[in-house]
Image (cartoon, rainbow, N blue to C red):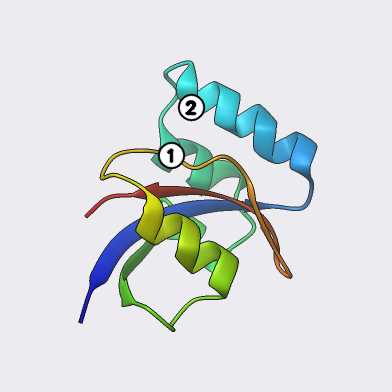
Amino acid sequence: MEQVRARHILVNTLTEAMDYYNKINGGEDFGVLAKNFSRCPSSQNGGDLGLFGRGQMVKPFEDAAFGLEVGKVSLPVQTQFGYHLIQRTQ
């Protein structure tokens, strides 16, 4: 079964998501931003969601995570939970 490992930052608005996306691309640490600003319980672990396979996450999130190269960060992905920045870590 194909799996990826990813972390994410979950926020309420596209504006917030783009702000953090720009900060990450400007050199700020993804994990620190996740810990300080993500509204997901995974924030305590720097946004780390661990390994997951297809069918375990909502489709837009899954498609983005599986489509990323290791180390890359997605543009904001909207789901019913809010806006996610996703970084594939494995």
Q: Which residue lies furthest to the top in this view?
A: 26
Q: Which mark sits nearer the N-terminus, 2 or 1?
A: 2
Q: Nearer the viewer, residue 23 or 56?
A: 56
Q: Mark 1 points at which residue?
A: 73
**Residue placed at 32% from the left, 78% from the top?**
53
Q: Where is residue 1 in the image (x, y as percent from the top left)?
A: 20, 82
Q: Left or right of 28: which side holds 89?
A: left
Q: In this view, does 65 lie above or below 75?
A: below
Q: Left or right of 59: which side holds 46?
A: left
Q: Is mark 1 on a helix, strand or loop?
A: loop
Q: Count up the numbered dots.
A: 2
Name the amino acid, label 2: Ile
**Residue placed at 29% from the left, 62% from the top?**
5
Q: Which of 54 and 42 is in front in this view?
A: 54
Q: Where is residue 9 in the image (x, y as percent from the top left)?
A: 55, 50
**Residue placed at 42% from the left, 18% from the top?**
27
Name the amino acid, label 1: Val
Q: Is residue 9 above or below residue 72?
A: below
Q: Do the residues labelled 2 and 1 touch (CB within 8 Å)?
A: yes
Q: Name the residue under label 2.
A: 24
Q: Where is residue 72 in the image (x, y as percent from the top left)?
A: 35, 38
**Residue placed at 47% from the left, 22% from the top?**
25
Quadrant location of residue 66?
bottom left
Q: Left or right of 80: which side holds 29?
A: left
Q: Left or right of 1: which side holds 58?
A: right
